[in-house]
Image (cartoon, grey):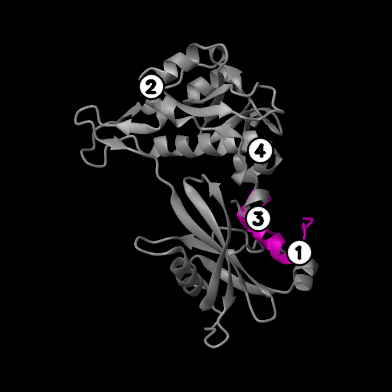
Amino acid sequence: MSSPLTDRLPLARHQVDRDYLTRDRADAVSDLLASDDTRVLPLWRGRTLMAAPDRLALLPAKDVPTADDYVYLGLSRAVDALEPVGTPLVAALLADDQAKALEADESAWGSLRAFGSDLSARDAGLAVEAIAVANWHDSHRYSPRSGRPLVTDKAGWVRRDPDDGHEVFPRTDPAIIVAVTDADERLLLGSNALWENNRYSLLAGFVEPGESLEQAVQREIFEESGIKVIDPEYVGSQPWPFPASLMLGFRAKVDVDDPGVLEPDGAEILELRWFSRAELAASLGEVILPGRTSIARAIIEDWYGGEIDQ
């Protein structure tokens, strides 16, 4: 059963049957590309070709240049899409020359960060899946054991060493993101060193090996802010393929018996501020919040009690 918050997250939506059994067919990709029923999603440098600002371009295979790599994404399950339910969907991972031959106008290639909240549930799930696997292909060209080039197998879901048969599978990096509140229900927001200095978001960090999610919440919040928290509560999750994260949302409370001392770590976080709901509303002219595609925005609005118009 999904979390109510997860149901509202733009990139947690999906209407695609991943049809994993088809991946095991030796000629799955070639058979799919030979079918007039199949539709292909072109990808280039982490961006998807767009048919409209709110719709992915899904093209007949014959209209897309031959790519070096393909990924079978599954079967469409959207009853309100242009493509019939059951349409096979394949991602084509295009090189620069292939992408420019297909569409030279770079503005036609969309960024998921920007348009993710505008897509249908089917297209949002499709784009996240395709971009995540494409990013994995880009960073796993060679065997971690031997350094030899790997070949694509199982409809784009495995890379294999052709000499010894060793298989490498896609991986996802879990990261926690936390709404920290104090005894007055104020929300803690931080400004990251990589952002403009008036952009604020929730604190977040990657889960370390051998660590539970709850331990990661407590460690990351203390490391980045000096604040000690208790009672981590999971609220929902959303994939974030930039390049390969799964964002796991939590709430946590400041430990009133041992709160620590509020101080940014000075490396990742340069400034920290507590906001009441009224203070956040009054600050919207100066403070930039995370975009609507992010889980951070959804968790902030969940605490706030409604949509924030910014």
Residue bearing the label numbered 3: 5
Q: Is residue 294 magenta?
A: yes
For image coordinates 20% across by 38% down, the residue present is 146
For image coordinates 33% across by 32% down, the residue present is 159
Secondary structure, mark 4, is helix
Tell me if label 4 and label 1 are in contact, CB under 8 Å: no
Return the x and y of residue 268 as percentages of the image width and height.
Answer: 50, 65
Q: Quadrant of the C terminus?
A: bottom right
Q: Decide which of tag 2 and tag 3 comes sooner along the chain.
A: 3
Mark 4 or mark 2, whichever is nearer to me = 2
Tell me if label 3 and label 1 are in contact, CB under 8 Å: no
Residue bearing the label numbered 1: 305
How much space separates mark 4 and mark 2, taking CA atoms? Answer: 28 Å
Quadrant of the rendered image containing residue 276? bottom right
Amino acid at circle 1: Gly
How much space separates mark 3 and mark 4, taking CA atoms? Answer: 15 Å
Q: Nearer the viewer, residue 235 or 114?
A: 235
> Which numbered marker is on residue 25?
2
Q: Is residue 287 magenta?
A: no
Q: Decide which of tag 3 and tag 1 comes sooner along the chain.
A: 3
Above or below: residue 305 compared with residue 6: below
For image coordinates 53% across by 76% down, the residue present is 229
Return the x and y of residue 218 as percentages of the image width and height.
Answer: 48, 72
How much space separates mark 2 and mark 3, taking CA atoms? Answer: 37 Å
For the record, the magenta segment spans 288-310
Q: Decide which of tag 4 and tag 2 comes sooner along the chain.
A: 2
Residue bearing the label numbered 4: 121
